[in-house]
């Protein structure tokens, strides 16, 4: 047994250091997981922002058509924009585990709709803002993870 250990020691000491850089493997620790979570959350928020825009567009067409601001043909794209909003929101929810952030774009677009209603002439924008805020609250309530009091850390 001693000879094998001596041979291993002499082999290690005799081998010159490599001039080539060692291959770099991606980290499997918490740093790479944390950056992956941040990236996935960012992508999910961007998808939710497009979803919120599509939802606001659909609601604007629907309420504007009902209020007589838009012609009766405005109802046709409501289904398409609603479908786009729903699909993007489902994809955004599947991309990240931190889903509570997905309500943020709906709040932002609701705020823009409210400001547009205040300074604009289209009164149906108040309804658009209200529905966007309701959507944000519903998403927040659905995606927030309840904290159990019984669990000990």
Image (spheres, helix red, strand yellow):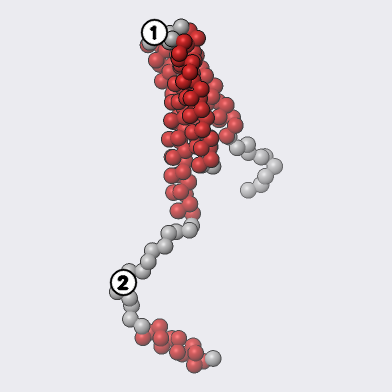
Relative to 119, 58 lies left or right: right
Placement of 126 over or under 138, stated as above or below: above
Residue 129 seen anywhere in this rendered image of the structure: no
Q: Is residue 131 above or below residue 25?
A: above
Q: Nearer the viewer, residue 141 or 148?
A: 141
Which residue sits at x=45%, y=15%? 74
Closer to the chain start, of discs 2 and 1, is 2
Residue pointed to by mark 1: 121
- Nearest the camera: 114 or 47? 47
**Dots 2, 1 in contact, CB < 8 A:** no
From the image, tell me which residue sits under label 2.
20
Measuring from the top left, give residue 121's x and y in whole percent: 39, 8
* Residue 83: image location, x then y, percent: 51, 27
Of 151 and 95, the residue lying toward us:
95
Q: State the SS at label 1.
A: loop
Q: Dot 2 lies on which element?
A: loop
Where 47 sits versus 127, above or below? below
Where residue 35 is drawn, which disc sits there? none
Residue 126: give x, y in percent of width and height: 47, 13
Quadrant in the picture for the N terminus: bottom right
Residue at 48 percent of width and 58 percent of height = 28
Give the residue displayed 57% in from the left and 26% down from the top.
138
Q: Is residue 79 visible?
A: yes
Other residues around mark 1 within 10 Å, as few (<14) / some (14–19) / many (≥20): few
What is the CA distance from the residue labelled 2 to the residue labelled 1? 69 Å
Q: Position of residue 49 (x, y in %)?
A: 44, 31
Residue at the spot 43% in from the left edge and 40% down from the top edge: 42
């Amino acid at each position: 047994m001693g000879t094998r250990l001596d041979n291993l020691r002499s082999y290690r000491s005799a081998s010159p250091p490599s001039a080539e850089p060692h291959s770099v493997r991606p980290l499997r620790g918490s740093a790479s997981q944390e950056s992956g979570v941040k990236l996935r959350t960012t992508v999910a928020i961007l998808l939710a922002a497009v979803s919120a825009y599509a939802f606001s567009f659909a609601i604007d067409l629907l309420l504007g058509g009902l209020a007589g601001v838009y012609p009766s043909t405005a109802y046709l794209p409501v289904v398409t924009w609603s479908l786009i909003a729903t699909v993007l929101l489902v994809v955004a929810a599947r991309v990240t585990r931190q889903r509570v952030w997905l309500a943020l774009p709906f709040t932002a677009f609701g705020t823009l709709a409210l400001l547009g209603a205040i300074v604009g002439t289209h009164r149906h924008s108040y309804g658009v803002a209200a529905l966007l805020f309701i959507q944000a609250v519903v998403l927040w309530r659905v995606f927030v993870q309840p904290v159990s009091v019984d669990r000990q850390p």
